[in-house]
Every structure is written in structure tokens, then in C-alpha cells.
Image: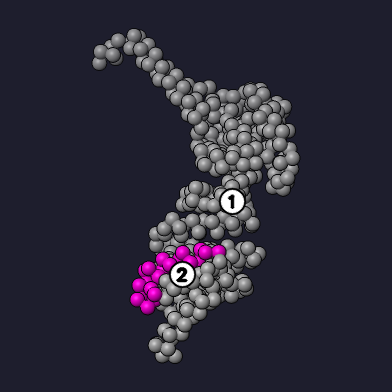
Amino acid sequence: MSHDAKTQAILSFLQAQAAATSELAGEYTQMEDLYKRKLWHQLTCVLESFVKIPAAASHLVPLFETFVKDFKHKLNKMALARIQIAVAHQMADVEDVAAFCKAAAEDAAKEEAQASSFILSELARIQLAATQIEACKSQLDKAAGYMEEAGATNEVQAAYYRAWASYFKVKGPAHEFYQHALLLLAYQPLAQMSREEAVTISFDLGISALVGENLYNFGELLEHPVISVLQETQYAWLAHLLRAFNAGDIAQYEVLVAAHHQQLEAQPALLQNTNFLKEKITLMCLTETLFQRIGPAADRSVSFNDIAAASKLPCNQVELLLMRALSLQLIRGKIDEVDATCRVEWVLPRVLQKEQIQLMHDQLKTWCGTVDSTLTFLEGETPELAAA
């Protein structure tokens, strides 16, 4: 087909679509005008707006195949990638989607690595929705390679980590979902998400924090708007539960479990991890108790009786609790079985809440007073050193 004939075919297509769909006639007429005048940037803007119109969904595949393909090489690669993903979502067969997106990613890679990563990340989520879990992982591994080639925009980073978070939500483990979901929120804040997605990811983050292995400090999460989102919904109980865990407050935990047992039992992840949750809050109670003993003026030796009282455990189970904490590297120290004490050398670093910061402030203030008193004493006892 000659160039003129091809151009005429495209214009005829746009005119026919405008005549057939009065709701979208204005957009099609605008596309025709911009195409004739070769105003590619303006045409790109119109197309990006067009793909977001709900009524246009069924038009996207034929529009791309008949119209956009003709000048796609003239478009900004990221804008083209967004349009291609919108088109992909309208394809019925997931294999057709995969072929379409892979070709688009390979084509984009010649000029724009981050556009390829964006396309593959979105393809991964489409495949995951179709339960093609291994195919999803394969696309994400390829996307990771493109991410390393060049600095990516927040939009691309968000697409990448959203896909990984979706993958780990299905595949596990929970702590991987937790980490990738927080990375997603670093590039796309909750305020920029739809209300539905913001609530869903906030809830999933809360659940994964509770059941995730090696997650023994929720300080970062508690300072995040995720908690505010939860408190504004029927999931406010989850925000309270996270606070109780972070503080190692076993008494509050038991109150919440009694008050919200129906909501807790409705969550399979929590129901299946009842014993783990009990162990986890007990360990978090231990680390909080020992944290209060860390500091310049604090007595680092903690008796088994004190730990038993805080953790609500029998004294004969305290040593096992300490050994578990040591094996998880939540603490470092030495257990004295004869004196029934634990000498604390280190507690897992954490994002501190205001109360914990105040505790450290008070400890340092006490230590400074002790140092000053010691210095004054030494100067009085050894005046020759003070004179020197």
C-alpha cells in the first residue's frame, strides 16, 4: 500500500469511528486533525487521555492496530508504553497480551530501558491475575535487568515494586511482600493511589508485618500514613494491634484479641499463625524490656524474674525465650544460669517512637550527670591533675 493510500485508510478509519460513536466523536476528530498536521506531542496527549475514558475501552485495540502503529516511532517511549499497556488490558487472551507486551518491551529497549521495565512489570501483573505465577516472575527478572541500566522515574519504580509486591502477596513469604510494598509507597504515596488500592495495601502491609518472619520492629510502619488509612476504615483494630506488638504490650494484645476475635478469625493468615503471633509478641516484649536497660546509666543485667513478670511467662521458660531471641539475633548478651540473669550487650536497632526517644534522652541526661559528678569528685581528690 502506498503512503498516500495508507494515510487515507487511517483517516477513513478515524472518520468512521467518529460517525459510529457520538460519545467519542470529538476525540476522534481531534486525532484526525493532529495526525494531518503531524503534531505528535499533542496527539500523544490526546491518546493518553483517550485510553483513560471508560467508554473507549473497546476501541483501544483497533485504534492501536490501525492508527497508532503508523506513527508510534515518533512518540515518547514512556507515553507509548502507557498507551500499549492500556491496549494490552483490553486483549482477551493472555497469550496475545504476552506476545504484544514482549514485542513492545524489546522495541522500547533500543532507546528507553525504563519503558521496557514498565511494560514488563505491568505484563507481570496481568499474568499473575491469570495465575501464571512463574511467567510473572520471569517478566520481573527481566524488568530488573532493565532497571539496572538507567535511573528510572518514580512511575517506573512504582510499577516495578507494585508488581513484585503483588507477586509476593500470592507466592510469599510475607516479609518480602512487606519490604516491596513499603518500597512501592516510597515511589507512589497512598495519597496518589485510588482509595480502594490505598486501603488494600495498608491492610496487607499490616497483616504481613504481624505474620512476617524477622519483622520485629514496626516503627517505620507506625510512622507511615498506612496507620491513618487503617484507622479510618473497619480495620482500625489492625492499627491498634500493630501498636501493641511494637510496644511489646502483651496485656493490650490480649485485650484486643478478646475484643476483636471475630475479625481476627476471619483472617486466615492470622488464624494459621496463632502460636507464632504469641511467640512474636513475647519476643517483642522481651526486646522492649531489655531496650529499657540499654544505656550509659542503665543496669544491663536483667533478672529472669523481671523478664517473667513482663512477658507473663513462668520463670522456667525465660531461659528458652532468651535463647530464642539470641538465635534470631534480636539481642546479644550472656545468660547466667546460676544467678538467673541475662547480661544485655545489644538490642536490635529499631525505628523509635516518641516515648522510646524520651527514654533515651532521660538515660543520656542521667549519664551526663553521673559523668559530671565523677569529674568533680576526681578533681577534688586529685587537685594536682586539675592544676595540670
Residue 306 is one of the magenta-drawn residues: no
Q: Residue at x 49, y 30 (%)?
A: 354
Tell me residue 383's x, y (percent): 30, 10
Tell me residue 131's x, y (percent): 65, 64
Tell me the quarter of the picture where residue 305 sits.
top right
Tell me the quarter of the picture where residue 307 sits.
top right
Residue indicated by mark 1: 196
Q: Residue at x 61, y 63 (%)?
A: 128
Q: Decide: marks 2, 1 in contact (CB < 8 A)?
A: no
- Residue range of the region highlighted in magenta in the rendering: 33-54
Q: Nearer the viewer, mark 2 or mark 1?
A: 2
Residue 324 visible here: no
Q: Residue at x 59, y 34 (%)?
A: 243
Residue indicated by mark 2: 26
Against 383, residue 187 (above or below) is below
Give the quadrant of the C terminus: top left
Tell me residue 184's x, y (percent): 51, 52
Tell me residue 113's x, y (percent): 42, 67
Residue 223 visible here: yes
Tell me if mark 1 has few (under 14), some (14-19) or many (20+) residues whose alpha carbon lies within 10 angstroms of its own. few
Looking at the magenta stretch, what is its main secondary structure? helix
Q: Secondary structure at mark 2?
A: helix
Horizontal side, residue 328 vs residue 151: left or right? right
**Which comes before the other along the chain, label 2 or label 1?**
2
Horizontal side, residue 178 vs residue 273: left or right? left
Against 169, residue 66 (above or below) is below
Q: Nearer the viewer, residue 221 or 262?
A: 262
Q: CA distance from mark 2 to mark 1?
A: 31 Å
Q: Secondary structure at mark 1?
A: helix
Q: Amino acid at mark 2?
A: Gly
Give the quadrant of the N terminus: bottom left
